[in-house]
Amino acid sequence: MSLAQVRPSSPRRARRTIWDVLRPHEPIPRGTYLAILAGSGLGMVAAWCALTYGGVVAPLFLPSPTTTIRSGITLVADGTLLQNAEASLSVIVTGWALAVVAGVPIGILMGSFKAVEALIEPVIDFVRYLPVSALIPLLILYIGIGTAEKVAVIFIGTFFQLVLLVADVAAHVPREQIDVSYTLGASRAQVIRRVLLPATLPGVMDTLRITMGWAWTYLVVAELVSADRGLGFMILDSMRGFFVDRIFVGLATIGGLGLGFDLAFKWLHRRLLPWSPKA
Amino acid sequence: MAAAKLSLREITVVFRARRAPEVVAIDRLSLDVADREIVSIVGPSGCGKSTLLRLVAGLVRPSAGEILLDGRVVTDPGAERGMVFQSYTLFPWLTVQGNVEFGPRIRGMPEEHCREVAARYIQMVGLTGFERAYPKELSGGMMQRVAIARALANDPEVLLMDEPFGALDAQTRAFMQELLLDIWQKTPKTILFVTHDIDEALFLGSRVYVMTARPGRLRAEVSVALPRPRTLEITTSEEFVAIKRRVLAMIREEAGKALGMETAPAVP
Ligand SMILES: Nc1ncnc2c1ncn2[C@@H]1O[C@H](COP(=O)(O)OP(=O)(O)OP(=O)(O)O)[C@@H](O)[C@H]1O
Ligand SMILES: [Mg+2]
């Protein structure tokens, strides 16, 4: 080796530049992360303030933070918000839970057994391309415009996607984990119960979280079409009276509840599956 | 040789994939392994070594030929043929302890027995203190040691090892090689050991099979008549070095073929 090739070892400098923060997949210090997070949130609020208090956008289209908060307090105080939120929540949780109870086992069977896949894949692939919104008229015709119809919309909206997502999770259980259990003496039933099922848990948890997010979309669609209560109904009703501030309260509630569910799922994932690579 | 513990007769394995040419992974391969013998298998990458072990494990069916264990045809996997895989195969939802006692547990051994066996093998591979750790908290080498402990804890008659020490650093690797021989001296098992490392193959095996480039056939069988119990010192002995030189020359030639060269570069 020639002398020119020998470089003095450069100790890692503590000084950071913007480039250190922008390395692909590289973790960044927690403080930096939180600072960016807070900056993003505050930036949004600041933009909102600037647009409304600065008079850039007419209050008819975008209410100011103060109006929105005041309206929110009123809606909570007279019980409107809670009533509607409760109506939406019960529909969403019922429809989603039914889809989960039916869809997860079917998905696992479909992803694990080629025979089951051949049996149900054609049906599911057909139905899942039918937008749920297109089925709403039919559902109203069959079961009316009550709670059952909304539960059915959520069920149909989530069930088919859920089956496919769970099937994909089950199909990706590493082949070698199954092989090794056979060489350890596991029977087929044991492989399913003690290897396949636990191996799918993290993926299933993720699927539950994702489909819960979609359930909100279907709920609001259903409530916009026909409802006399619920957050979607509240938003539509507020639009009729040009109560833009109420619309924003409704949106904030939906966003807040969605975020709450998301965080709850992430927390559950860490608590229930501490071994998962994502925990 | 007395009646073989394990016997492969004219095995051929052809993989057929849709829209791909068929691959003859193993072509009319026969070999015998005596009871409680360690046989090493070396050969160029892709020559069918893993396939050979999976055949014996019962995870792959031969396209032709048969595999006999104690004179009976092998068709399915069984606990008497344990396997350590080339890739990581620990169950991520089980702790180190849970992984190691997986075999005894599913075979319905009493709780106490499972715990005691797990403790013994975890200690053997030097992972005492990590019983409650999950695989994601372990290094690659530690995971592989758990996989070895898991296979051993099931006390199989035949142990199929597919480059089990490939991921380990040189020191741990040497330690594990001696440990394996030590365990084998105490509780002799029939071991088929696949490796890329010729020193390892010769140090562990009573015989070394050299496979040809794909399709895998036996190129040669080299007997390693070194006394046992062996320690790593023998790897510097003259006898060892002489055998190694022969095996190396053969492998180099096969590796050359595998890479599409007609003849290997001259060996000094
Ligand atoms: N399931 C499969 N389907 C199709 N081809 C396969 C399959 N398994 C193995 N093969 C092919 O069989 C040949 C032998 O593979 P094998 O994994 O046994 O090689 P190997 O000797 O273990 O290689 P390495 O040393 O790289 O691990 C390869 O050409 C591979 O592509
Ligand atoms: Mg291999």
Image: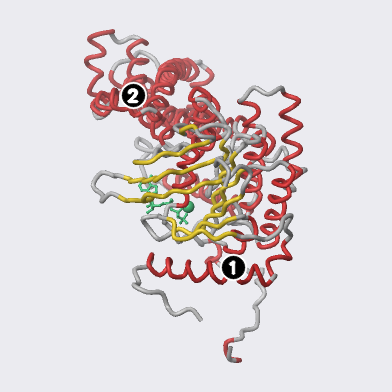
Chain letter of mark 2 equals A
Residue A109: quarter of image: top left
Give the residue type at disc 1.
Ile
The way the protein has been coloured in the rendering is secondary structure
| Disc 1 CB within 8 Å of nearest ligand 1 atom | no
> For the point 25% across and 51% down, which residue is it?
B21
Residue at 69% across, 36% down: B97
Confirm whether residue A256 shows in the render.
no
* Foreground of the two, B30 or A68: B30
Residue lying furthest bottom: A3
B7, above or below A234, in the image: below
Other-residue count near label 2 (Cα within 10 Å), few / some / many at <14 / 14–19 / ≥20: some
Q: Could you tell whether B228 is left or right of A39 in the image? A: right
The three-letter amino acid code for the residue at tag 2 is: Val
Front residue (pair A7, A158): A7
Tag 1 subunit: B
> Which picture quadrant has residue B211?
bottom left
Which residue lies under the disc numbered 2?
Answer: A116
What SS does tag 2 mark?
Answer: helix
- x and y percent of residue A77 in the render? 54, 18
Residue A122 spot, x, y in % from top left: 24, 26
Q: A73 or B45, which is in the foreground?
A: B45
| Residue hosting label 1 | B243
Q: Which mark is residue A22?
A: none
- The N terminus of chain A, quarter of image: bottom right
